[in-house]
Amino acid sequence: MHGAFCGYTACVATEQRPPNLRTALGGAAALVILDALVLNQGVIAVLVGLWTLFVSLPRAAFNKVPDVRRVRLVRAGIFLAAVVLVFTLNWANNQLAKHRADGLVAAVKAYQLRHQRYPDELEDLAPDFIASVPMAKYTLMSGSFQYWSSPQRHTLLYVVFPPFARAVYNFEAGRWGSLD
């Protein structure tokens, strides 16, 4: 029958055809990869979450065809789970970056005590103070630490929320601050 979808119980018009769950899983996986592991922002996840809560979920809940309603609700659940996963991964990455940054700060201070000067670069800390310079986060963008050394100022930086919201440690002042 052209223009219709025949499911388990009945044929319905194509506009009532249930969405493909494989497509939903692929879209949710793409959201997690892009927004948590590449960009590390969560902005796309916010938009997807709002769309799912205020458009997809009501549309699914009020659908009169039970099979279509069930699949659309599952699809909405998949996207909401992906949104939660994005925020969980972003939070975990920021906790990891803070923990690793505190380790680098301690290593730089130990280097300064031993050599009576700050290191010129983080690589100077290995292997005596750290095994190797760690990545700040498990992300493709903004996942590394930056260190600046000048005669007057020594600073460690990592990005909390790309492209702005950077955590900065000033060694002369001995405290964390933020840029942006």
Image: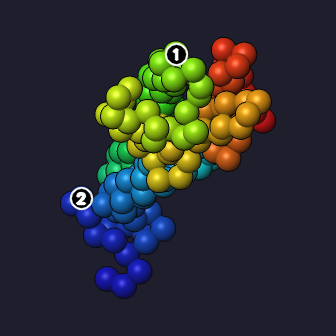
Question: Which quarter of the figure is the N terminus placed in?
Answer: bottom left
Q: Position of residue 130 (x, y in %)?
A: 36, 29
User: Label 1 neighbourhood size at 10 Å, few (<14), some (14-19), many (20+)?
Assistant: few
Q: Position of residue 66 (x, y in %)?
A: 35, 48
Q: Position of residue 176 (x, y in %)?
A: 66, 19
157 or 76, nearer to the observer: 157
Q: Is residue 70 visible?
A: yes
Q: Secondary structure at mark 2?
A: loop
Label 2 is placed on what type of residue?
Answer: Thr
Which residue is depicted at the point 48% across and 18% down? 114
Residue furthest to the bottom:
2
Q: Is residue 99 visible?
A: no
Label 1 is placed on what type of residue?
Answer: Leu
Q: Secondary structure at mark 1?
A: helix
Relative horizontal placement of residue 58, taking residue 26 as reference (left or right)? right
85 or 11, nearer to the observer: 85
User: Label 2 neighbourhood size at 10 Å, few (<14), some (14-19), many (20+)?
Assistant: few
Residue of label 1: 113
Relative horizontal placement of residue 77, taking residue 112 as reference (left or right)? left
Which badge, 1 or 2, is on the more N-terminal residue?
Answer: 2
Is residue 18 placed above or below 97 in the rendered structure? below
Marks 1/2: CA–CA distance: 77 Å
Relative horizontal placement of residue 86, taking residue 66 as reference (left or right)? right
Which residue is depicted at the point 38% across and 26% down? 129
Is residue 134 placed above or below 15 in the rendered structure? above
Residue of label 2: 9
